[in-house]
Amino acid sequence: MNALEIRNKYLNYFKRKGHSIIPSAPLIPENDPSVLFNTAGMQPLVPYLLGQKHPSGTRLADYQKCVRTVDIDEVGDNRHLTYFEMLGNWSLGDYFKEESIAMSYEFLTKELEIPAEKISVTCFAGDSDCSRDDEAYNAWKKAGIPDERIYFYGKDDNWWIAGEEGPCGPDTEMFYDTGKEKCSPDCQPSCDCGKYVEIWNNVFMEFYKDKNGYSKLSQRNVDTGLGLERMTMLLEGKETPFETELFYPVMEKLIELQKVDDIKSRRIVAEHLRSSIMIVNDGGRPSNVDRGYILRRLIRRMTRHLNKLQIDLNKLDVFLDVSIDSIKELYPELVNNREYIKNVIIEEKNKFVKTLEHGEKEFEKVANKTKNSGNKVIDTQSVFNLYETYGFPPEMTEELAKEQGLEVDMSDFQKLFKEHQEKSRKGVEQKFKGGLASTGEKETKYHTATHLLNAALKRVLGDHVHQKGSNITEERMRFDFSHGAKMTDEEKKQVEDLVNEWIEQGLEVSFIEMSKDEAIKSGAECMFIEKYPERVTVYTIGDVSKELCGGPHVKNTSELGHFKIKKEEASSAGVRRIKAILE
Ligand code: SER
């Protein structure tokens, strides 16, 4: 049974059991700057677990795209993945333990046809916060699991919460027995020797944890998570996810083109390739901060390992195609975005390639110097130079260092990095002030036209359009925005017409002051949210545009004259540039 069949069976089964099927939220959480990526199916559903009414009802099922990067350095072994898909069914104050367990058992044994004797389960053992989960235990007994395959563990194993605070509760986990020998007489599901593989986790979320401890939620929820890659691996009878159809085509191509044999490098390439594709597909772009930085690390690490395999880096194109092809049935949206995704990843690889060779030489020098001086830890200034001059993420320097028995002091690096960031932030503020001081009448008009252009591009090209930069002189405006393809003449015309229509309509330009949070909630457009102070001004133009902005602007769009696009060109991968004038 392949991944798509498993997913379809799952969604169909839960549909028959009265669940509404809801779409996967994007990997990049909407309206939640506190997390970089969706790390679990429950994340986009938190408000509903807390009691808000979900428009699709109280029984939901979905597949959720997830990225977890805590284990990024573990990728390369036989199981860790940064991107994975979680199948989930949800009860929002509807059914609870008994029904949830009965459905899981039926799905595993009847739909996936896993022999019952291969399934072991674990339940919460109880402590001072919450008693032993006899309800789950009884439900398993009723379903047909005998005592000898039911285990009890404490909070470390059988309690689930995302992070430090939030909805949580005891869980029951299902394990698949691979049939391998026990590693010791008391080998159990909690042992990670590989005999038992966790396949499904049902969390009974009836608590909320904050810094004061646990309290009861207003409703009892169920949150379940079944990892698609792992289930595919088991049902395809494979030992690792890399041998399944999800990864194997890329692994095979790597074997074909490699000059050096290294299974760890192959796995890293195949895995990072897939997560980069999925992140870019959901709007991620490489950068030096937050999720952009994670993406950058993934692409750079992947590039370095292609290099280790001595594969011609121009072949990345081929691997991207093979990787997209192996998952396009699961994610059909990849097909339309294929060229855009490839451009972004290849451009980032190209940026890195130029410096990789020099950087690796420089690293060798630094490593030798460290060894010769009898030290184990590479001095932080050198790590910083490798980062700044050669684009080596410090984590990568750390990885290279480890290969030579050396170390990097990451917390010292962070300190140096912060100092540096502070200096450059001051520099940017200085420049910004300078720019505004020279705003004359003509520039003010262009400024307003920029907002109209941004809004028009969104309507014509789609919501993926965001401002990436802007520059205004007395003579013209220049506007950079995210979009993967060259604009057609038709599209340019539509944008021009729309802007001119708005100008002719004589729309009022007004602003109000509000808190940054309110502004984000109101859906205002904004380029670098972290650069704005706590109180911001939001400019609206009629009902066509709403943007965070310091101004200044004209009072009415009728003051602008006629808008004309002079040029549309590439600025960098996935970013287009428009030069336009007001006549
Ligand atoms: N939230 C739980 C998990 O991520 C179950 O979906 O494992």
Image: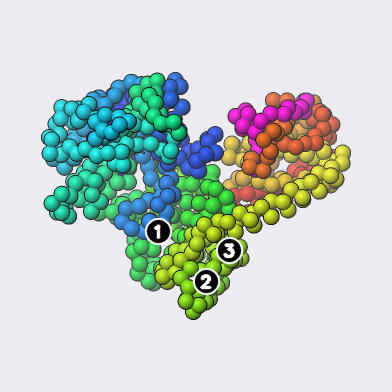
Magenta stretch? 507-528
Left or right? Give the position of 430 relative to 574.
right
SS class of the residue under badge 2? helix
The local secondary structure at tag 3 comes to: helix
Q: Amino acid at mark 2?
A: Phe
Q: Is residue 144 magenta?
A: no
How crowded pointer 2 is (Cα within 10 Å; few <14, some 14-19, many 20+) is rated as: many
Q: Residues within 10 Å of mark 1 (few under 14, many from 20)?
A: many
The part of the image, by quadrant, that contains residue 390 is bottom right
461 left or right of 306 in image:
right
- Residue 547 falls in which quadrant of the image? top right
Q: Give the x, y percent position of residue 325.
A: 40, 50
Q: Which mark is residue 384?
A: 3
Mark 2 or mark 1, whichever is nearer to me: 2
N-terminal of the pair, mark 2 or mark 1, is: 1
Q: Along the line of sight, which residue is nearer the eye, 425 or 280?
A: 425
Q: Amino acid at mark 1?
A: Ile
Q: What's the distance in space between the residues labelled 2 and 1, CA to CA?
A: 21 Å
Q: Which mark is residue 387?
A: none
The residue beneath circle 2 is 363
Q: Which residue is mark 1?
A: 268
